[in-house]
Amino acid sequence: MVAGDYGVHYWVMLRATTAVLLACALFTGCQNSKKKVIGVVPKGTSHIFWQSVQAGAIAAGRDLGVEVVWNGPSQETEYSRQVQIVDSMVARGVDGLAVAATDRTALSQPIDRAAKAGILVTVFDSGVDTDNYLTFVATNNYEGGQLAARKLAELVHGKGKVAVVMNAPGSGSTVDREKGFDDVMAKEFPNIQIVARQFGMSDRAKARDAAENMLGAHPDLDGMFASAEPSSVGAALAIKARGLTDKVNLVAFDSTDGMVADLKSGAIDAMVVQDPFRMGYQAVKTQVDHLHGIVPPKRIDLSARVITKPDLDKPDVKELLFPDLDKYLK
């Protein structure tokens, strides 16, 4: 090879090598710029509450530049299914994970397994029997139950008989609401008796049956508290079916379009309302903060709010009750 040929060959090789290195750099850059994935596992997916949580989570994903993967059991009583979903998210290697536990005991070990795999979980809505998590984002449910008790006591003028349509055994959030309700009634309103309580098993039809049973057994009932959306819907259906709208005062928890209509008609007298959109947003945000080295508080409390018929015309109440779900879910 002559000197001229060697020079040409050298520059050809150099240019080829540079091109390869540049391609590798670009590929690595693309790999590094891939969006982080945050898995969000709700208790269930069929109720409007969880759809609002999903909208908030997706909104956070868009705002904060992460991919949100949403997957949960269809019903809030499918404990083993939720465990499987959490374990599959961990096996997939998501960058962050947020879980609303269907059962505080059943989900403690999957959350511990996630932590062992290097994924500190944000627990939201309902607590778990482990401290091995990043943060807990939830409505102050005990306080929400207290608000419900005081409102129902006001409606029945501080005396009479009331019943409770509970949600499901082991559901941390609703157990806390029910305890808050019981404690206030016992301490502050000695002339009000809680004469009956039954589980609706997070199912509207079963909740209606439970409410019907209690209304039938206690025809002199003055009021009723329902601790979750399906319990509230079932209780309202039972009260309307028996023509007791003007007699039995119902304080519901959470909100749907149908429940708002019942509030307008008088079948529901007050609703204790959470902000599920904000809850979903905060759950994802805490995971993104963690990925950026920001340590969130161990607990983030979101306040509930009592809403009555006159409140429905307030702009902030309209925004709370009717978030634009289509903007995020379609």
Image (cartoon, rainbow, N blue to C red):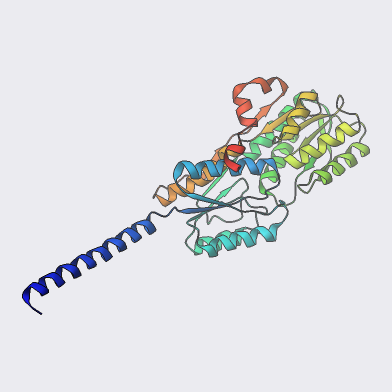
Is residue 198 at least partly visible in the picture? Answer: no
Q: Is residue 182 left or right of residue 329?
A: right
In the displayed structure, 310 sits above or below 122; it is above
Quarter of the image for residue 164 reads: top right
Residue located at (64% from left, 43% from top) = 51
In the displayed structure, 41 sits above or below 329; it is below
Q: Position of residue 213 (x, y in %)?
A: 90, 42
Quarter of the image for the C terminus: give it.
top right
Give the residue furthest to the bottom. Answer: 1
Residue located at (59% from left, 63% from top) = 87
Q: Position of residue 93 (x, y in %)?
A: 50, 62
In the displayed structure, 204 sits above or below 74; it is above
Quarter of the image for the N terminus: give it.
bottom left
Q: Is residue 14 left or right of residue 129?
A: left
Q: Position of residue 46 (x, y in %)?
A: 71, 47
Q: Position of residue 261 (x, y in %)?
A: 76, 28
Q: Give the total number of marks visible in the rendering.
A: 0
Quarter of the image for residue 4 reads: bottom left
